[in-house]
Amino acid sequence: MDPHRRGVFHSIKKHLVTSQAEELIKHFSVVIGFNGLAAILLFLFHIITTRMLGPERYSVVGTAFAILYLFYIMFSIIGIVLNHFISYYKTRYQYEKINYLTTYAIKALFFAGVSIFFLITVFSNPIKDFFHFNSPMTAVMIGLTVWFTMMSYIYEGVFIGLHKYNAIGLFRVLEAGLRIAFVVVFLTLGAQENFAILSLALGTILALIICYGPIYEIQKLKFDKVNLKEIFNFAKYAFIALICYSIMINIDGFVAKHVFDAATAGSYLAGAVLAKVPFFVSLILGGVMFSKVTRLYANGKKTSKILQNSLLYTTIVSLGFAVVLTVLPDKIFSIFYGGDYAFGSLLGLYALGFGLLGITIVLVLYALAVRKFKLAIIPPLFTILSIMIFSVFNVSFTVLVIKVFALAALFCAVLLYAAQDVIDFDLFISKFFRKPKHKKYISLKVG
């Protein structure tokens, strides 16, 4: 093998096994391990609904998921913030503060969920008309699911912050399993797509009730008020950034349901489920990185190695997934969804677009963690640009995918350029492509 290439591989191998890399892998493995089985079960939910409902009826469920993802990404910061502060209080045995923060979060999110449910119910008819639902009750079911899904972030943040990994694992797997059980029963009995959406809400509600025990143990303690202003300041920029991302990765699905016929929209939304996998992996990794980098930065420790590892793992997942979906798009679609669904050769390009967005969210969360707020301006600008471009509804299937990729590529390029004073890219490149040092040998003449 060429010495330079061998040096590259050796550099990457050495880079992957550094202590900070091992620690990041450990934290990432814990979180991804809990979410891994739940994600498989959630994907199984999609497979069941796509096959039992068909493209036309699945387009309703796919739109419901797009709306849920909108709120999922937006409010995922809640779990990150709770994890960060509860972990901090735990190391100082300040369980009274953990109780106060947990109880405050439960009350705040409960009433926020009620408000969102009320607004969606009030505007259920306009929502029905825009997405071509058969009934406004579909929007009501979506609102109910959003309400209780928001409460699950509290469990995730509290359990991980307290290092109760078995508890969060049980909750996520139980939630996904119950959703599958409900949807199988409903659809087998001949229920309509609204009941498939209702099964999402019911699975979450039952899981919240069953796994309430650790939360109850915390709430039996006394209160000790915390500085909520500090928490809001910590979270506000990340929350704004995540609102922007929640719009950017879902807006094309909303347009597809509004513009295309039901069968075409169903195939497009089924493809979106696969294509968004790299982004959600990046979001999970970015959340772990954000919490860890924030703590290290506050203690004056170096954090660039963590970003370097996070970008490496994100890039590997994004490119690998895009290649697979490019090489075998029809085969994969047929295996998972059956012969009634088709996306075509653009599935890999579609996934690559979301993979690029995944890289950007890691960069943005890192910049916010080290208090480099300049990059926080870029996501809102591109969100406005996305809304303007996707507001032109006269589009085809192909044009919609190309728009997603082009915007993601442009966003990634602009963000990388703007991040040059935050990230030492020359250092990153030199880590992977530096030439190996050759040992010097001294020849000794005999005689």
Image (cartoon, rainbow, N blue to C red):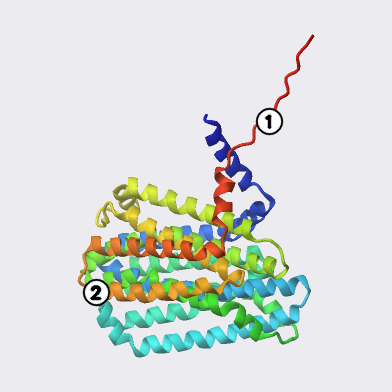
**What crowding class fits label 1: few (fewer than 14 Cα within 10 Å), some (14-19), or many (20 or more)?**
few
Image depth: mark 1 or mark 2 in front: 1
Look at the numbered disc 1 and give the secondary structure of its residue: loop
Please, what is the three-letter code of the amino acid marked with disc 2? Val
- Image: 43 above or below 135: above
Query: Where does residue 311 sit, x and y in percent of width and height?
Result: 53, 56
Taking depth in this image into account, of 341 and 41 the one nearest to the observer is 341
Q: Which residue is mark 2?
A: 392
Among all residues in the image, which is located at the extreme top? 447
Query: Where does residue 110 sit, x and y in percent of width and height?
Result: 53, 85
Q: Which residue is mark 1?
A: 439
Residue 32, quarter of the rendered image: bottom right
- Image: 48 above or below 394: above
Query: Where does residue 193 sit, x and y in percent of width and height?
Result: 32, 72
Query: Where does residue 79 sit, x and y in percent of width and height?
Result: 58, 73
Please, what is the three-letter code of the amino acid marked with disc 1? Lys
Q: Is residue 92 left or right of residue 398?
A: right
